[in-house]
Amino acid sequence: MGASQSGPVHMFQDLAHKTGFSTEQIKNLHNRFMYLTQDEDTLRREHLENISNLALNPIRRQIIEAFFDKRNMGEKERGCLQEIGFEEFVTVLSFFRPPKPRTADEMKNIKKEKLRFLFNMHDTDNDGIITLDEYRHVVEELLSSYETIGAETAKAISDAAMLEVASVTVGQMGPGEFYEGITFEQFMQILKDVEIETKMNIHFWNLDTRTMQCGK
């Protein structure tokens, strides 16, 4: 029996080393993964769509897609996967893990990784720029829960916000200039004063397996 368990134990320890989760957390996440997939080896979008708490999130689509974005797996190629295994599942969740005390340089790298993850969520066409259309879509989704705000008002709010970003990142533009969008470097500059490394977290997954049977 000990030999049969050595494989999973070694995998849990390896993933703990790679992601910063504890071995016990990895074990609980594996239980959660198997619960979501109904004991299948791979996770698909429909499995995440069944999470009730996530269904209430206005940027639910972006969060789900982040789990299947190759850029978040450390791969150089772009594109999306149709399904992922447990290692990819944990890799994406590790972006939301609060960091342990580190050196200043290590914390700087952690912040950059988290910002890159957020940038990828909004750069839906993988072209390295968050365009006005992409930004507008996110703002409209965030405002969709407010019934008193119509589509035209949401569009006006997102356009005004994007113009404000443009004024900060590129300065005053001439009448014939066109603002293409936000690059990752500009994205980092905009959020340089935000402690994203400690504030970025997620609530729809539960490390406590005792509560899993109460609902997804």
Image (cartoon, helix red, strand yellow):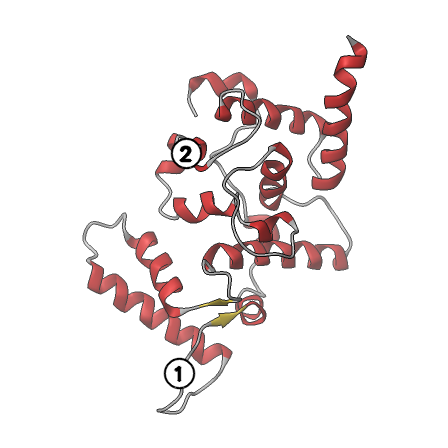
Q: Which mark is residue 150?
A: none
Q: CA distance from mark 2 to mark 1?
A: 39 Å
In the depicted view, which residue is nearer to us: 194 or 134? 134
Mark 2 near mark 1, Cβ–Cβ under 8 Å?
no
Name the residue beneath numbered marker 1. Answer: 178
The crowding category of the residue bearing disc 1, from other C-alpha atoms within 10 Å (few below 14, some 14 to 19, many at least 20), is few
Left or right of residue 135, residue 152 in this image: left
Does 15 appear above or below 199?
above
Give the quarter of the image for residue 131.
bottom left
Q: Nearer the viewer, mark 2 or mark 1?
A: 2
Residue drawn at (36%, 66%), measured in percent from left and top?
A: 133
Q: Which corner quadrant holds the C terminus?
A: top left
Give the quarter of the image for residue 60.
top left
**Can you give x and y, in whole percent of width and height, for residue 102 in the image?**
76, 50
Name the residue beneath numbered marker 2. Answer: 46
User: Can the viewer see residue 195?
Assistant: no
Q: Does label 2 or label 1 sit earlier along the sequence?
A: 2
Secondary structure at numbered mark 1: loop
In the depicted view, which residue is nearer to us: 195 or 173? 173
Q: Which corner quadrant holds the N terminus?
A: top right
In the depicted view, which residue is nearer to us: 44 or 55? 44
Left or right of residue 78, residue 139 in this image: left
**Can you give x and y, in whole percent of width and height, for residue 80 in the image?**
51, 49
Does 70 appear above or below 54?
below
The crowding category of the residue bearing disc 2, from other C-alpha atoms within 10 Å (few below 14, some 14 to 19, many at least 20), is few
**Can you give x and y, in whole percent of width and height, for residue 58 in the image?**
35, 47
Give the mark count.
2
Residue type at mark 2?
Glu
Does 167 appear above or below 129?
below
Residue drawn at (37%, 57%), measured in percent from left and top?
A: 138
